[in-house]
Image (tube, grey):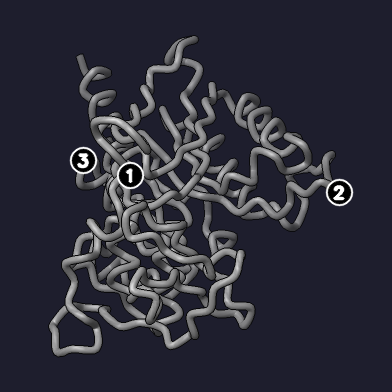
């Protein structure tokens, strides 16, 4: 299928969709480093600009629109929020693209907290908005470790389908392939990154450098011990309290994960090169959808595309 990607970042979602056999024809992000990374590794079809400056008419009409919109406007203190809330401008643009272009499907990704925001008022409003725009919606809370990603990362995926395609959802959400216990156990972080050379030795691995932010252990995100025999904790996009990114501690307890190791936990290919400062690269990785899971979504789109042509 042909796809438009909003809030693309470095392109984890897009790369997986492309690997499955789809074509991303237009993408957008405001972050210059992320766009440079995307162009170097994926393609030149990405526009670097604030999405609020984009003319909706300039966005191609396609089969699928994907993206992860911010949700700051859906606060508990703002349960009766409207689409013109200033903090919802980015969500509003995503919504307007869907409503104007009427793709057959859309895929929206967000943090787990969107389900509980305003005691569920936010997600109910989002579903109502897309219902009004002409779409059936399914909501899925996913632990990436259940899909072979070496990371206990929980994210929400909203799948939308144009009502004109029928009353039943045609998109079959990927079935989990791994579990904490069972035949296919979760992939551990040691399995994912144990083969990398010591970053302090001579090597030619791209982005294999790490933050000097001191490893200290306390019961707080980004400061907990990393168990080598379990999936990695969630790779972060922020968190050191100084506008920097708090990279997860390596299980050797001597340093934090390198950019390359963090990217492998997010299932980026090992030759995928990130552009920008160390902090920028960590942030790009932390904001991404794991490529392996994105490919599974893409495979379902390919199946649907083939089915709809017959």
In this rendering, position of residue 112 left or right of residue 87: left
Q: Residues within 10 Å of mark 3 (few under 14, many from 20)?
A: some
1 or 2: tag closer to the N-terminus: 2
- Nearer-the-camera pick, 211 or 155: 211
Secondary element at tag 2: helix
Inspect this view and state whether residue 59 appears: yes
Q: Secondary structure at mark 1?
A: helix
Alpha carbon distance from label 3 to label 1:
9 Å
Residue 141 shown left or right of residue 25 in the figure: right
42 relative to 99 in the view: left or right: left
Q: Residue at x 44, y 17 (%)?
A: 169
Contact, mark 1 vs mark 2 (Cβ under 8 Å): no
Instruction: Estimate the x, y position of residue 131 in percent, counting from the top left.
Output: 62, 24
Q: Which residue is mark 3?
A: 20
Which residue is labeled 1 in the image? 294
Q: Which residue is mark 2?
A: 77
Mark 3 or mark 2, earlier in chain: 3
The quadrant where residue 125 appears: top right
Q: Nearer the viewer, residue 289 or 136?
A: 289
Image location of residue 44, percent across then percent down: 27, 64
Task: State the residue at coordinates (14%, 89%).
Answer: 202
The foreground one among 212 and 229 is 229
Vertical placement of residue 174 versus 201, above or below: above
Kindly report the distance in space between the C-alpha atoms of the residues bearing marks 1 and 2.
34 Å
Mark 3, secondary structure of its residue: loop
């Amino acid at each position: 299928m042909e796809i438009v990607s909003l809030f693309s970042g470095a392109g984890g979602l897009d790369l997986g969709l492309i690997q499955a056999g789809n074509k991303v024809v237009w993408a957008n992000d405001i972050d210059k480093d992320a766009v440079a990374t995307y162009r170097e590794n994926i393609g030149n079809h990405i526009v670097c600009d604030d999405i609020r400056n984009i003319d909706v008419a300039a966005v191609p009409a396609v089969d699928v629109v994907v993206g992860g919109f911010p949700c700051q406007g859906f606060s508990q203190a703002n349960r009766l929020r409207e689409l013109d809330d200033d903090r919802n401008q980015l969500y509003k643009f995503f919504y307007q693209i869907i409503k104007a272009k009427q793709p057959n499907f859309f895929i929206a990704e967000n943090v787990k907290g969107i389900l509980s925001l305003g005691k569920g008022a936010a997600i109910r409003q989002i579903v109502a908005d897309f219902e009004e725009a002409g779409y059936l919606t399914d909501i899925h809370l996913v632990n990436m470790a259940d899909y072979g990603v070496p990371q206990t990362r929980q994210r929400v995926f909203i799948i939308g389908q144009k009502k004109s395609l029928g009353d039943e959802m045609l998109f079959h959400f990927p079935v989990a392939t791994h579990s904490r216990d069972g035949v296919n156990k979760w992939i551990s972080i040691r399995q994912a990154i144990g083969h990398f050379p010591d970053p302090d030795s001579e090597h030619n691995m791209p982005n294999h450098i790490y933050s000097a932010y001191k490893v200290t252990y306390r019961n707080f995100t980004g400061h907990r011990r990393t168990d080598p025999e379990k999936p990695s904790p969630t790779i972060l996009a922020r968190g050191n309290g100084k506008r920097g990114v708090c990279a997860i501690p390596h299980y050797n307890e001597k340093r934090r994960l390198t950019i390359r190791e963090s990217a492998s936990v997010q299932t980026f290919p090992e030759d995928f090169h990130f552009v920008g400062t160390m902090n920028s690269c960590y942030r790009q990785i932390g904001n991404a959808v794991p490529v392996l899971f994105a490919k599974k979504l893409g495979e379902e789109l390919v199946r649907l595309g083939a089915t709809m042509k017959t």
